[in-house]
Amino acid sequence: MSDNSRLHVNFFAPSTPNMKAEVFIAAAILGIWGLLSFGLPLLIWLAGLGDPQGLGRSFITEARFLGFPLHYWLIAQGCTIGYVLLCKLYCILWDKKVPRIHSSGGPRP
Amino acid sequence: MRLNNLPGMGAALLLVLSTASLGWAEQAVRAGEEIFQLEPGFKAAPALIMLALMVVYVGVGFLSRVSTTSGYWVAGQGIGKYGNGAAIASDWMSAASFMGVAGLLYLQGWFGLGYIIGWTGGYVLLLVLLAAQLRRFGKYTIPEFLGDRFDSHGVRLFAATVTVIIAITYATAQFKGIGLVCGWIFGMSYASSVFFAAGVVLAYMLISGMSGVTRNQQIQYVVLISAFLIPLWSLMQKAGGSGILPQIEYGRLLSDLMEGKTAVGVLEGEELDKATRAYLPWGTGGSIYHFIALVFTLMVGTAGLPHIMIRFYTVKNEDIARRSVLWGLFFIGLLYWSSPVYAALGKYWNPLGGRAVADVIILSAPERAELGIAFIGYLAAGAMAAGISTVAGLLVAGASAVAHDWYATVFRPDSTDKQQLLVGRLVTAALCAVVVLFALNPPALIAQIVAMAFAIAGNTIFPACVLAVWYSRANKYGALAGMTFGLALTLLAMTGWILNVPAFTATGLLPATSSALLVCPLAFLINIVVSNLTTDKVSENSLRRSDQVLRKLHNVPGHPEDSRRPQGSFAAK
């Protein structure tokens, strides 16, 4: 793709206003997604490092939320509810931020 | 291509199966040991419920037959957000979700939750990185998308091969689930019930011709989710709760289980220790590395599954594509918020049942709670709906990869519809036979086998698709190198798992169900490095065609140089 007339697409260097808006929203959502998916398990792991038996006991496993051990609720329901809300947030942000284009190459066939 | 009326298919399948069954029958008895944990014998009410639902599916398929290829492959691109959401959920929720997740949670406790967040979080990736762009491309298959974007038949063939491998691995697990349920309903051995299940799936595909797939998937979603949720209310009441919202109520039950309080009395000593450990983070033997590796693998796998991605082609426009992911994930969430309840109730009634009961825990828990045969029959019918809708989708995805992407596009572009149909039939029969052979002696639990299919998708299709959409310098050499590396390492891990090589087992460095944490980023890297090293080797024409696809993916109007070329001409290739 040495030719300058070519379209340059790179997630980390979006070239058109449309792509910039899409990438901005995607990066924001992916950031929260990463915190939920990997941040929470890491937090549970870090908190449980002090357990001499190596089973991961900590204040998170001792705490109760809606009757659940907190560490269980966070992963079983906290994350999954979070994902559904993230999808909703993505749709809202997209509707607000991404310019509408309806060219012949656009979304409507 | 239409896959209905397949007389040759049944005969070919019968021949292969009868030959193969001789040697495998003995191992199959062991593989199906789970059924013997349940009450044996023929059950009239569940059998009736199941047959009635089969008649509905076939009837719907028959009534919504289509006559165009667009109608056949992408349902005329007229599906709305709720409808496509339900179809995504039904396509997605297989025997693994319906039976396997509860089984894993029963065995692995907290650690098993990795399957739940892996299989839901992947939709976020799919939504933000691929859904809208794939809809803008708007054709029929994922191998077709990759083949057009990289302007390469090699990439097309490779992606089609991977699709076939995924279909076989994934469908193996479904057949195990369907086989277990059929065995329970009709009182057959595991081997016989796998054959019976193959007959049921083939009959379903033969008569309904796969034409009413989307509508059927919507009905199957209603059947499977109601079958899953309704028994929970009674089950929770039997366990001493109010039964109003079991998904919240089981929290207290779980906390009690950690203190050893069960239906069979308060556990003590070693048994209490076992019950407590099950719900502590690392009590069942996993580590933080294995948890994150599993979650990551299932997420990228979810975002790389060809039969899920093509659901975006079936909707009206990209707005609907995005919203249908939201609704699909919500519908999937309803099941995943509920399957841990079955696992907890299973522990409550049967705290010490091991691996042998895990894959049938959703039948075993209501059975032990004496819920009534009709209730459990409906539950079993839901499991059948889950398995059948996914198998049908998978067999068509596999058959289309060969008949549409290999045969009709690459090897015989001048082939007639009739020839393509014949190839489609033969491939479907062959795929079904291979799947049955594997299902007779499955190497792992249902959800684990499915996780391996996700590892393949996450290590091959996902990196190729993301770079195809978001990195214009990615070319066919990079895509082929990345996909070859991803596939080779995944297959190596799967073989190692089956042969019990320490590095590839559940506690090893590269478990077959979790290989993507290491392999997927490397596949990305190899694709990028090789693409940059081979920039000069791609022809000017090829670059122009890739550029056109990218303009379509990102809604960028064509360059003036291309203005004489009619818009979308590349799509008619």
Image (cartoon, coloured by chain):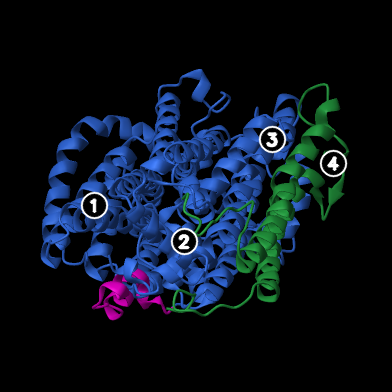
Chain colours: A green, B blue
Residue B516 spot, x, y in % from top left: 53, 37
Which of these two is toward me, B310 or A12? Answer: A12
Nearer the observer: mark 4 or 3; the answer is: 4
Q: Which residue is mark 4?
A: A60
**Which of the chains bears the disc numbered 2?**
B
Give the label on residue B278, or none.
Answer: 3
Residue receiving disc 2: B550
To which residue does mark 1 refer? Answer: B406
Say which residue appears at 65% left-offset and 72% top-offset. A98
Task: Please give left or right for residue B84 compared with residue B438 in the image.
Answer: right
Amino acid beneath label 4: Ile
Is the residue under label 4 in contact with that under label 1 (CB below 8 Å)?
Answer: no
Between B426 and B554, which is closer to the camera in this rendering?
A: B554
Q: Which residues are magenta?
A: B57-78
Question: Where, by quadrant of the figure, is residue A62 drawn?
Answer: top right
Q: At 44% across and 30% down in the image, what residue appears?
A: B489
For marks 2 and 1 on the same chain, the one whose residue lies earlier in the sequence:
1
Q: Secondary structure at mark 1?
A: helix
- Nearest to viewer (mark 1 / mark 3): 1
Q: Residues within 10 Å of mark 3 (few under 14, many from 20)?
A: many
Tell me the CA gap for discs 2 and 1: 23 Å
Q: CA distance from mark 3 to mark 2?
A: 49 Å
| Mark 3 or mark 2: whose residue is earlier in sequence | 3
